[in-house]
Structure formats: C-alpha cells, structure tokens
Image (cartoon, grey):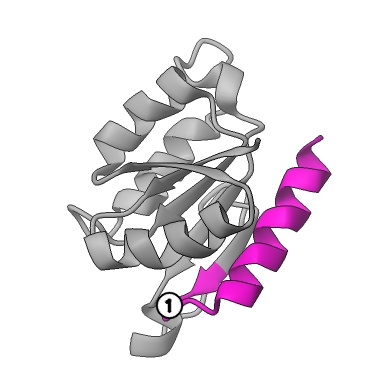
Amino acid sequence: MPKILVIEDEPDMVEAVRMPLEANGYEVISASTGEKGLQMVKEVEPDLIILDVMMETTTAGFQVSLQLRSPDSSSEYADYRDIPILMLTAIHNTTSLRFGPDEAYLPVDDFVDKPIDPDVLLEKVAALIEEAQ
C-alpha cells in the first residue's frame, strides 16, 4: 500500500485529501508544519509527499521542497530527494501570481489547486507514484 505524507496545516484540507486517497487504497500520514513534515519524511519514508505552500509562513512549502531536493550529497535529506512532491496551492485562485515547477526555485513535480477536485488529486497521485517506480 503506497504511503502518502500530507504536510498541511489546515485540518479540513488534510481531511479533503485523506478521504479520497484512503478510499482508493493509499495510507495517509499527516504533519501540520514544515518542520514536522521533514521529520516525518525520515520516519515513514513516504512514496509521495503532498505539500501545502503556505503553512506557518507564506513560503514554508517552498522551504520544505528546497530542503528535500537539496543537491548537496551531505544533506540529511539526500536519501529522500527522489520522493515525488505534489504541491497544494490556493495562490493561483487568490492572487495573480503564477508559478510552476522549477528545479532551482521550486523543486516539486506537480501542483493541485485548492479547492481540491478528488478526481484530479487521485489522477496526479497515481501518475507521480507510477513515474517514481
């Protein structure tokens, strides 16, 4: 059963992600801060990470993705660099800011917009897990 780590500070959003994933055979673990999320990555070694952009700070998600994808081979997260990251964002709906995956600035694999469409979420999760295997 694939393990998915959801790093998100809003309990309602965690549930909106958890319900369709668990209903489709995924194990879901959650962390409410970027710091806890990084700790959980080491503990559970997830198959996929779903990461919110804005948590304890407006850029917490960016910072987590940069730490996980650090090119430094001595990074404490070097062993987890290849775990796919799906970023949750409401920024495209609430501001005119636009961004996409970028190896240097935003090293994630894909985005899913809030409010979450369960079908889109499941499709992206399945595709990223399959690609990573």
**Nearer to me, 72 or 80:** 80
> Helix, strand, or loop for circle 1?
loop
> Against 33, is 70 above or below?
above
Q: Is residue 21 magenta?
A: no
Q: Quick check: is 119 in the magenta stretch?
A: yes
Residue 90 relative to residue 9: left or right: right
Percent x, y for residue 38? Answer: 37, 31
Judging by the rendered image, the residue that carries numbered circle 1 is 114
> Residue at point 43% right, 77% down?
114
Q: Which residues are magenta?
A: 112-133
Closer to the camera in the image, 55 or 18: 18
- Give the overall secondary structure of the magenta segment: helix
Residue at 42%, 70% (x, y): give it: 89
Q: Looking at the picture, how far across and down is residue 46, in whole percent?
A: 55, 32
Please say whether residue 104 is visible from this viewpoint. yes
Q: Residue at x 42, y 19 (%)?
A: 43
Q: Is residue 112 left or right of residue 36?
A: right
